[in-house]
Amino acid sequence: MLAPREIDEYLLPTERRVIRVRQHWAVMAKPILQTAVFILVVVGVEQFLDGSTNAGVGVLIDNLAFYLVLVAVLRFTAQTILWWIERIVITDKRVMIAQGIITHNVGMMPLGKVTDLTFRRTLAGRLLGYGTMVVESAGQIQALNEIDFMPRPEEIYEALSELVFGEKGKTRATGMLAKPRWRR
């Protein structure tokens, strides 16, 4: 009941899935760092205060530290689950992104409305293999204006360019990108 629907359930019978990926694992670097720093600070403060207080207050500080660390770990777990279930799907007719656990959001842009397609890569993105895909349409901001942490952006950019701007049925994306390596 609370589990999000599989994004393939939103595809029309006439659509063919070309690419299906999740955001690059590097999107989790910030939550990992935040959680680790928070836990280290809590443990450090707890150790500092534990030696300078009496036994009754020490138990309170230990319990408080335990619950703060527990909340941090639960927060990190929720962020990991959100990352894990988010999917980016490109079909031969549209680009879709599905997000959320309790509130499930599906953003979509028809390929026919795409007027401009670019991607950016920072130094970290080049080293780790991710980029930001910018999909623009004529005069309006769509649900999928910018997709951050896109894995293998050159390959996806090339496939999406062929789907949007290539001749129907004559692009390499027609059959090449439907290989299992895109279906993680």
Image: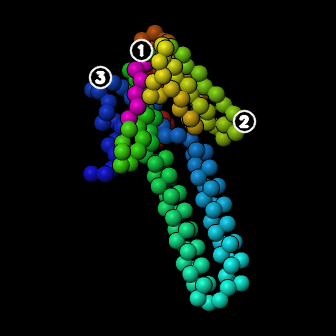
Residue drawn at 60 percent across, 59 percent down: 35
Crowding at mark 1 (Cα within 10 Å: few <14, some 14-19, many 20+): few
Task: Label 3, secondary structure: give it.
Answer: loop
Residue 110 on the magenta segment: yes
Q: Tag on residue 123?
A: 2
Q: Is residue 97 left or right of residue 36?
A: left
- The CA distance from mark 2 to mark 3 is 40 Å
Place of residue 24 in the rendered image (x, y in percent of width and height, measured from the top left) = 56, 41
SS state under label 1: helix
The quarter of the picture where residue 49 lies is bottom right
Q: Residue furthest top?
A: 167
**Label 2 crowd (10 A; few <14 / some 14-19 / many >=20):** few
The correct choice, above or below, for 90 with respect to 103 in the image is above
Question: 120 above or below 69?
Answer: above
- Of the pair 80 and 12, the residue shown nearer to us: 80
Q: Report, in whole angstroms, how far the alpha carbon at label 3 lies from the one at label 1.
A: 15 Å
Range covered by the magenta-colored residues: 106-111
Name which of mark 2 and mark 3 comes first in the sequence: 3
What's the residue type where badge 3 is placed?
A: Thr
Earlier in the chain: of badge 3 and badge 1, it is 3
Residue 119 highlighted magenta (yes or no):
no
Query: Residue 125 placed where, x, y %?
Result: 66, 37
Tag 2 secondary structure: helix
Please name the residue that numbered disc 1 is placed on: 112
Percent position (x, y) of residue 16? 36, 26
Q: What residue is shown with label 3? A: 14
Residue at 48% across, 13% down: 138
Q: State the residue in front, 86 or 57.
A: 57
Q: Can you give x and y, in whole percent of width and height, for residue 149 in the image? A: 58, 37
Instruction: Please say whether residue 54 is visible from this viewpoint.
Output: yes
